[in-house]
């Protein structure tokens, strides 16, 4: 519920306006832009602060929650982090930004000993969605730093790796 509340509290439209001057395209994390119709993505990744607050209350945080966000000191994306911090605060999610050296931040990430983490993809994914999705979301992947675990998603991720038809892979 807290993860869903975080997602609902982020105003992606504002983020796009502030960070990229309104240029960009909505897409799901780990997917290649254009893989899904933008209208479909906006339905799933909607902005709803009231719903975020409701979910936090259901999770036992009716008075809000404090989270720590370790990031690499000197990171060029600090302004983006501060914008997300301000957006989350509106839903009662109080984020403390914690600048660390890169080795310390990476060790926390690998150990799973963190509250929040982010990766802002700068168009580094190639045309195959597997390149950004499998490592981050497959439950047994060493790159699944958020320890996301969903049996149905694992089944789909493994299935698309076995499919040779690019269109069928995209559908999976």
Image (cartoon, rainbow, N blue to C red):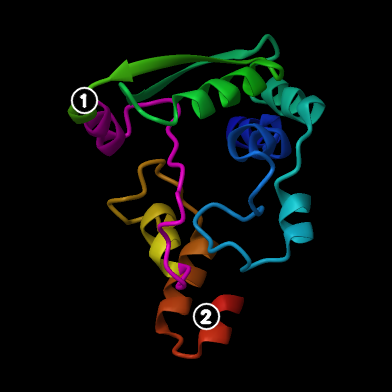
Sequence-wise first label, 1 or 2: 1
In the picture, the disc for residue 62 is none
Identity of the residue drawn at 40% across and 53% down = 136
Residue furthest top in the image: 63
Decide whether residue 117 is among the magenta residues.
yes
Q: Nearer the viewer, residue 34 or 156?
A: 34
- Locate residue 1, reporting x and y percent: 63, 33
In the picture, the disc for residue 104 is 1
What are the residue bounds of the magenta stretch?
Answer: 105-129
Left/right placement of residue 66 relative to residue 106 reads right
- Locate residue 34, reporting x and y percent: 63, 66
- Locate residue 60, reporting x and y percent: 64, 18
Q: Nearer the viewer, residue 88 or 67?
A: 88
Q: Is residue 140 above or below residue 171?
A: above
Question: Looking at the figure, which quarter contains the C terminus?
Answer: bottom right
Q: Nearer the viewer, residue 15 or 58?
A: 15
Identity of the residue drawn at 70% across and 46% down = 45
Left/right placement of residue 38 relative to residue 163 reads right
Q: Quadrant of residue 71?
A: top left
Asked whether the viewer can see residue 171, the reply is yes
SS under mark 2: helix
Left/right placement of residue 8 relative to residue 117 reads right
Distance from disc 1 to disc 2, alpha carbons, whole Å, reads 37 Å
Identity of the residue drawn at 71% across and 33% down = 14
> How busy is the neighbourhood of tag 1: few (under 14 within 10 Å), some, or many (20 plus)?
few
Marks 1 and 2 close (CB-CB < 8 Å): no
Most frequent secondary structure within the magenta stretch: loop
Decide whether residue 127 is among the magenta residues.
yes
SS under mark 1: helix
In the picture, the disc for residue 169 is 2
């Amino acid at each position: 519920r807290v993860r869903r509340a975080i997602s609902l509290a982020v105003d992606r439209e504002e983020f796009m306006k502030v960070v990229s001057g309104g240029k960009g395209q909505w897409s799901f994390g780990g997917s290649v832009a254009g893989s899904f119709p933008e209208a479909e993505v906006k339905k799933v990744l909607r902005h709803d602060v009231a719903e975020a607050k409701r979910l936090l209350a259901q999770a036992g945080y009716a008075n809000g929650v404090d989270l720590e966000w370790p990031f690499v000191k000197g990171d060029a994306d600090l302004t983006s982090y501060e914008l997300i911090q301000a957006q989350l605060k509106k839903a009662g999610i109080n984020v403390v930004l914690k600048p660390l050296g890169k080795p310390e931040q990476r060790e926390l990430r690998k150990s799973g000993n963190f509250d929040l983490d982010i990766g802002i993809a700068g168009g580094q994914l190639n045309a195959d969605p597997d390149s950004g999705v499998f490592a981050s979301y497959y439950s047994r992947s060493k790159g699944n730093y958020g320890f996301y675990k969903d049996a149905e998603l694992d089944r789909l991720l493994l299935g698309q790796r076995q499919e040779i038809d690019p269109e069928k892979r995209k559908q999976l």
